[in-house]
Image (cartoon, grey):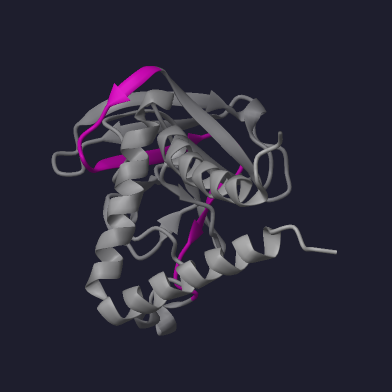
Amino acid sequence: MPPPRSCLACLAVVALLVLTGCARTGGEPFQPTHNGPLPLDEGTTVGQTINPAGDAITGLDVQVATYTAPADPDGTLTLALRDPDTGQRIARTSVAGTELADATWVSLRFDTPVDVPDVVLAELSWEGATRLAVWANTPASPQVRSAGVPNDPYEDGELVVDGLPRAGDLAFRVRGAAGPGAALVQLGEVVASAGSRLLAEPVFATLWVLAMVGGVALAVRGLRPRRS
């Protein structure tokens, strides 16, 4: 006998929550928003301070721009993890220019997971005969800098250009080292974070809960088989 449709709806909600926890375990945070390239000229470094979900990371994904021309195949894009307070390098990895293409995501991976502090600086540099940039989400111009960064989904870090902080964020994804067993822990953090935000706004929380209960009731009622 197949399960009732109402049970299937509940299972779907549970599955979405579990997938949320798994997504955080596999690679959180993710900041895909960008509105312009930051050049990695010779001697220039572009970085991002990151508060990763776990205690170790395996790499970083960034989106690059080659200005429609092929990247120097003999060039090297380097990622260095540093302690943001002392500047001490924690780990280093790189990819060759042959792996870079315009407006594509590039995966930089470490040989083994790297233990990191609560906040880590991911610093990028480029050595090559062609121009290369990384995409970022920054204020449109100095005139509107006071308005903040548009559509900023990641507020726990900031850009760092040549060692100096700058408003905005890289387009980046952290690759965590936690396995599926950490999904429940990450899910707990998601629920706790959402709960704390709702408790901070009691009126909104009450309306949200009522809306959720009403939505579930309507969904269950709509899934009931109708009499002929």
The picture quadrant where one finds residue 34 is bottom right
Residue 138 shown in magenta:
yes
Question: Residue furthest toward the right?
Answer: 228
- In terms of depth relative to the viewer, which is nearer, 130 or 108? 108
Question: Residue furthest toward the left?
Answer: 86
Q: Is residue 78 left or right of residue 205?
A: right
Residue 25 shown in magenta:
no
- In terms of depth relative to the viewer, which is nearer, 183 or 106? 183
- In terms of depth relative to the viewer, which is nearer, 71 or 17? 17
Q: Residue at x 25, y 27 (%)?
A: 90
Question: Residue furthest toward the top?
Answer: 111
Total number of numbered labels?
A: 0
Residue 134 in sight: yes
Residue 129 lies, with reference to residue 169, above or below; the image says: above
Q: Residue at x 14, y 44 (%)?
A: 85
**Which quadrant is the N terminus positioned in?**
top right
The picture quadrant where one finds residue 122 is top left
Residue 77 location (% of width, % of height): 50, 32
Residue 129 location (% of width, % of height): 59, 36
Question: Residue furthest toward the bottom?
Answer: 143
Q: Residue at x 31, y 23 (%)?
A: 114
**Which quadrant is the C terminus positioned in?**
bottom right
Residue 179 in sight: no
Write the start and end of the magenta stretch as one range. 112-140
Residue 81 lies, with reference to residue 84, above or below; the image says: above
Q: Is residue 67 left or right of residue 47?
A: right
Residue 143 location (% of width, % of height): 42, 84
Residue 204 location (% of width, % of height): 34, 79
Q: Residue at x 55, y 66 (%)?
A: 217
